[in-house]
Image: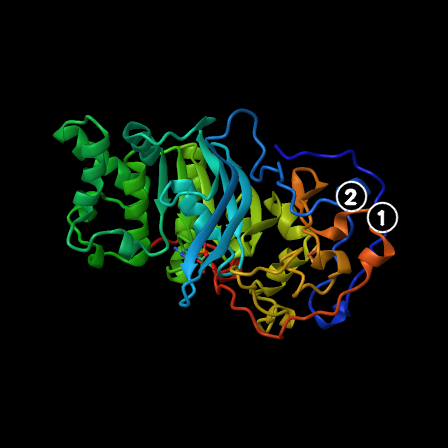
């Protein structure tokens, strides 16, 4: 899992660029795990850091060195590449929730789609229970029944001309040998598992006759029908009414322990990630910039981008929504900035940040951060502050936040 170095004495923060006073950010403290000059020459070295919660044994699902570059046509006969996911390794152990957070376009859904096998990676591999996923029909069938994707919009994931009964019975027919009576019993159990009770009230309903939260519960029940090992939930509550989000998040929480599921929860909303997840993985422009235990990431973020995300999370105690400190918008992934992709927006950017990609470095227990602020041994020249180049454009953030959630477990 994460490679760690012996902790060394913390070093004084140096090299902040610009005046951080013009943002909500304060310079992250240098970590005790700073590494020395030997690493500084490496530019975008493939990293062997595996993100995700640390648990003994083989993770249910693991991705190694995933890369996805989408080819697109420029209109003048040239093919350009969208660098959507760059060299990400992530492990999802059974009985854990890993949240993947980041702004729009950071590559969260692409990562989830790569893990489902819906799209092929440009490079890298996916392992189920430690075994590389095969390409044959049998291997694919086993994989599809083990890894289930829950989508943002439960309306689009259910067929409006079919009843709940149809949606639940179909996977049971395809993936189990249950007889008719056993299937009927199993459908009742599935609806009860997602708190749609009494089950008889729901079986013959059509999607449009259900609320958003109930539809999402049916979509989850349908996934559970094939007894998956892994649940990939891509913004599963962002289209639901604020009042029913907590109920669905609590259901995911319950499935982690009850069904021992390995869950990846994709969200814009770092506050709900803290509520639900064991581990938070922060993505920026196709790369992981920080990962670690959820409470550490939210209480002591070490990467300036994580700080920015947290400063923008709606806070009931704050009268106005901040505009990410006026720190610009995410970059184009067709021609991403060299060095640290965050450097045009970073209030602490140094000369080295514009030229050399920082590798993830240990900054605490099971906590890594890809930022030059956590490297020791930079020269004066490398630490030279950069003038910020980002336009002061507000960046949209999700309205969803723990502060928006009711504190009861209300369901739709
Ligand atoms: N099929 C595709 N062809 C070309 N580019 C794509 C394709 N799918 C995604 N992208 C691009 O890849 C990048 C990452 O997209 P992705 O949907 O993974 O982001 P995201 O973090 O899920 O964003 P959001 O929060 O808005 O859902 C974006 O620049 C997007 O335009
Ligand atoms: S490495 Fe990136 S995030 Fe860290 S100080 Fe440099 S620009 Fe900022
Ligand atoms: Mg997405």
Whole-percent x and y of residue 391?
62, 74
Q: Taking 322 as reference, is 33 above or below it?
A: above
Whole-percent x and y of residue 394?
57, 73
Regarding residue 129, the answer to whether it shows in the image is: no
Q: Which mark is residue 361?
A: none
Q: Residue at x 47, y 32 (%)?
A: 94
Query: Label 2: which residue?
Result: 34
Whole-percent x and y of residue 400?
48, 61
* Element marked by disc 2: loop
Badge 1, how many Cα within 10 Å: few under 14, some, many 20+? some
- Circle 2/circle 1 CB separation < 8 Å: yes
Q: Quadrant of the N terminus?
A: top right
Badge 2, how many Cα within 10 Å: few under 14, some, many 20+? many
Whole-percent x and y of residue 245?
41, 55
Q: Taking 131 as reference, is 240 above or below it?
A: below
Taking the image as shown, residue 279 lies to the left or right of residue 201, namely right
Q: What whole-number distance in Å separates the C-alpha atoms at marks 2 and 1?
A: 8 Å
Q: Residue at x 20, y 58 (%)?
A: 209
* Element marked by disc 1: loop
Q: Which mark is residue 11?
A: 1
Q: Quadrant of the C terminus?
A: bottom left
């Amino acid at each position: 899992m994460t490679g760690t170095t012996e902790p060394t004495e913390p070093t004084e923060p140096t090299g902040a660029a610009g005046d951080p006073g013009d943002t909500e950010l304060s310079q992250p403290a240098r970590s005790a795990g700073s590494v020395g000059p030997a690493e500084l020459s490496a530019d975008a070295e493939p990293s062997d850091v595996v993100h995700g919660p640390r648990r003994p044994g083989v993770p249910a699902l693991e991705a190694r060195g995933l890369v996805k570059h989408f080819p697109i046509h420029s209109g003048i006969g040239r093919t350009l590449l969208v660098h959507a996911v760059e060299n990400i390794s992530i492990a999802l152990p059974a009985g854990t929730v890993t949240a993947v957070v980041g702004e729009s376009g950071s590559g969260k859904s692409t990562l989830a789609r790569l893990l489902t096998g819906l799209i092929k990676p440009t490079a890298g591999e996916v392992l189920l229970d430690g075994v590389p996923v095969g390409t044959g029909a049998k291997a694919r069938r086993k994989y599809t029944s083990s890894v289930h994707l829950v989508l943002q919009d439960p309306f689009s994931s259910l067929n409006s001309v079919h009843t709940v009964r149809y949606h639940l019975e179909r996977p049971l027919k395809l993936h189990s040998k249950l007889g008719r009576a056993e299937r009927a019993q199993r459908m009742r159990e599935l609806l009860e598992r997602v708190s749609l009770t009494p089950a008889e009230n729901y079986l013959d309903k059509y999607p449009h006759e259900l609320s958003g939260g109930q539809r999402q519960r049916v979509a989850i029940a349908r996934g559970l029908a094939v007894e998956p090992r892994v649940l990939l939930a891509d913004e599963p509550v962002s289209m639901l009414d604020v009042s029913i989000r907590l109920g669905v998040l609590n259901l995911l929480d319950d499935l982690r322990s009850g069904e021992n599921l390995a869950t990846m929860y994709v969200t814009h909303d770092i506050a709900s990630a803290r509520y639900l997840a064991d581990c938070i993985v922060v993505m920026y422009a196709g790369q992981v910039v920080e990962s670690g235990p959820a409470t550490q990431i939210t209480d002591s973020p070490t990467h300036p981008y994580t700080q920015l995300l947290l400063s923008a999370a709606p806070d009931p105690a704050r009268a106005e929504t901040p505009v990410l400190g006026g720190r610009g918008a995410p970059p184009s992934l067709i021609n991403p900035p060299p060095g640290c992709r965050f450097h045009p927006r970073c209030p602490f950017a140094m000369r080295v940040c514009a030229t050399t990609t920082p590798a993830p470095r240990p900054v605490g227990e099971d906590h890594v951060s890809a930022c030059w602020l956590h490297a020791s041994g930079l020269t004066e020249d490398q630490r030279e502050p950069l003038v910020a180049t980002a336009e002061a454009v507000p960046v949209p953030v999700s309205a969803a936040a723990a502060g928006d959630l009711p504190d009861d477990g209300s369901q739709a």
